[in-house]
Image (cartoon, grey):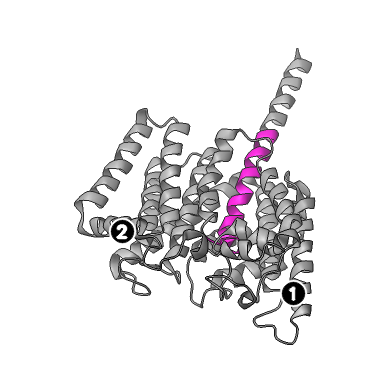
Amino acid sequence: MKYYLWALFLILNPFYFFESGNPQISDFLMFSMLVFSPSVISLGIKRSPFSTKSLFAFLTYTFLANGILYLVYITSYRGIPMLATVFYVYNIAVLFYVMGIANQNIRKFVVFTQWGIILSVGIQIGYYMVFGSYNYDILRPAFFFRTPNQLGYYALIMLSAFVVLNKLNRINMVYFVAVFLSCLFMTLVSASKAAVGGALFLSVYYLFDSQMLKGYGLVAVLVIFSASYFFVFKSDQGSRQADYLLERVEQGTKEQNITEWEYRGYDRMSNHPKYLILGSGEGMYRRFKTYIHHHEMHSSFGNLLFSYGIPGFTLFLVFFFSLFKGLSIKTSLYIVPVILYSFTHMGLRFTPLWILFALFPLIYSLSRYQQYQAKIKINEKTQDT
């Protein structure tokens, strides 16, 4: 039952019925799964090959930094206290839940995850083709999300997750091509420069890493490139989307007469360098001299460094790099598109990112298990002879 609920969570994840920053239907489902699965989470913690100590130390530091922030501004604090830490607690719990159910049955987990992604992406594309998307600018649809950037980020992560999962279990080429094209389509219509750039990098890299230029793989590549070419250069919608995206790239922040450094909120780092030491905590952004003084920094890594200083930033990096322990550089590079996106957007609260985090150590765990099984078979043959 838990694998069906897991697939349902993946299907429901992109459906935003409430404002951004609030729990969605999928979050309520996941929360109930977490509450009734403490043994699964415990197993995930025990079997995780990455640095759990640095992750828990980072989480503790967020409690400390955000707790001090609240106490300092207790009489004038705006917003929900410790909200950023609550998001980290939830997403870290999801990370360990994923590790837990995957360790219980890796094959089942991979298959149900693949089908969850297929159905989720398929439903979104199908609905958009029939009914369109009217919850944002017509040239930047958001589908069921609240903003186009959320759509682009989701599509980029799902594309990354799908190609990584394909390393664990080769799925039917028709489904693979369909999901690949659908995710590329969603990144393009979102007109998110970071998402489109990440998707292009991922497409080219996967083409050479997967050795698809032969047999059915070559056919799949030709279908993907032909469909992409037709949509971008031969269809009216594709041409409009491509022109709009290029216009956004060329214009950038010129109209506002500000730099990208200011537009993304990095200027608060140069204006308030003292917070780079121990961190400012997350929230109460009006206290900073910055272009986007009502909002957080539009950067995951920048936000980590400014909010939690050198200690928090270092602890997170130790955890992050430990995700790729024992993996080849070729496999680890599949995280690059998400890293590129993270320099211009704050995406650490996005739960699918933490699901993607879990897939890399699972590849390592599976390879070790296969090596262990191979040794057992060799020993059995040796004893028989």
Q: Are circles 1 and 2 on residues that touch, CB within 8 Å?
A: no
Q: What's under tag 2, amino acid-wise?
A: Glu
Lateral position of residue 205 relative to residue 87, left or right: left
Question: What secondary structure is marked by label 2?
Answer: helix
Where is residue 218? Give x, y as percent.
34, 32
Residue 172 in sight here: no
Where residue 124 sits, quadrant-wise, is: bottom left
Q: Position of residue 68 (x, y in %)?
A: 78, 73
Toward which corner of the image does residue 25 lie, by quadrant? Answer: bottom right
Left or right, residue 360 beside residue 377: left
Real-space CA distance between mark 1 and mark 2, rounded to the nearest whole angstrom: 41 Å
Tell me where the magenta segment starts and ends, as one range.
Answer: 345-369
The secondary structure making up most of the magenta span is: helix
Give the numbered dot on residue 69: 1
Q: Is residue 362 magenta?
A: yes
Residue reaching furthest bottom? 75
Residue to which mark 2 is pinned: 247
- Label 1 crowd (10 A; few <14 / some 14-19 / many >=20): many
Q: Quadrant of the C terminus?
A: top right
For mark 2, does the 10 Å Cα neighbourhood hold few (<14), some (14 to 19), or many (20 or more) residues? Answer: few
The residue sitting at 45% across, 65% down in the picture is: 258
The picture places residue 205, in percent across and down from the top left corner, at: 45, 37
Q: Position of residue 130 (x, y in %)?
A: 29, 67
Q: As displayed, is residue 316 above or below residue 328?
A: below
